[in-house]
């Protein structure tokens, strides 16, 4: 079975956790939002691990940094009077770096099934 097919269910689950986390942020459900960071970031790390030997690792790493930045920002809004939310720009910037690496590297072809 192709790698992309093997991890598809984890990607889908990851998106569900991410949406729940962000919905909790929007609805200001502080503790549930904080708890949902754990499975969301854990699955992001798992996807990085599963794609280590593919170009998709760069995109998955960018997604991890994006979720980490959003999670940090959410926590600052929830529990720290938003004082340090601008530090979220660091993982956001790292995400941009990994997206750039993905697109500038020679083997950054999209791995979706485009052969028909």
Image (cartoon, rainbow, N blue to C red):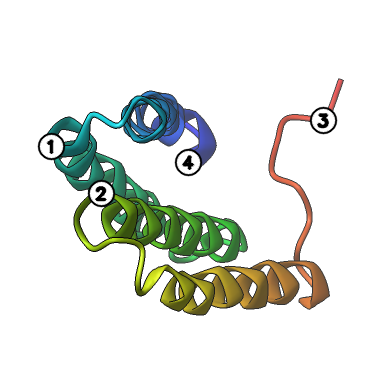
Task: Quote the CA–CA distance across marks 3 and 1.
Answer: 42 Å
Residue 105 horizontal/vertical position (percent): 76, 76
Q: Which residue appears at 33% of the width and 53% of the height?
A: 77
Quadrant the N terminus occupies: top left
Looking at the image, residue 41 sits to the left or right of residue 103; the answer is: left
Residue at the spot 23% in from the left edge and 63% down from the top edge: 80
Q: Tell me the CA gap for discs 4 and 3.
A: 15 Å
Q: Which callout, 3 or 1, points at the residue further toward the start of the chain? A: 1
Q: How many marks?
A: 4
Q: Position of residue 27 (x, y in %)?
A: 35, 24
Q: CA distance from mark 1 to mark 2?
A: 9 Å
Residue holding disc 2: 78
- Kindly identify which residue carries mark 4: 3
Viewer-side label of 1, 4: 1
Question: Mark 3 falls on what kind of element?
Answer: loop
Task: Return the residue nearer the eye: 100 or 49.
Answer: 100
Do labels 1 and 2 touch, CB within 8 Å? no
Q: Which mark is residue 114?
A: 3
Residue farthest to the front, as pictured: 81
Of circles 2 and 4, which is in front? Answer: 2
Say which label, 4 or 3, has the lower sequence index: 4
**Classed neighbour count for the residue bearing mark 1: other residues with Cα under 10 Å, few (<14), some (14–19), many (≥20):** few
Give the alpha-carbon distance from disc 3 to disc 2, as whole Å.
Answer: 43 Å
């Amino acid at each position: 079975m192709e790698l992309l097919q093997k991890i598809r269910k984890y990607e889908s689950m990851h998106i569900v956790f991410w949406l729940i986390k962000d919905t909790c942020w929007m609805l200001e459900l502080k503790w549930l939002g904080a708890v949902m960071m754990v499975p969301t970031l854990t699955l992001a790390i798992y996807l990085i691990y599963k794609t280590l030997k593919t170009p998709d690792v760069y995109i998955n790493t960018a997604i991890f940094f994006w979720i980490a930045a959003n999670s940090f920002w959410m926590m600052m809004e929830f529990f720290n009077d938003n004082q340090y939310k601008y530090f979220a720009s660091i993982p956001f910037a790292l995400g941009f770096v990994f997206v750039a690496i993905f697109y500038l590297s020679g083997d950054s072809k999209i791995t979706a099934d485009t052969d028909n």
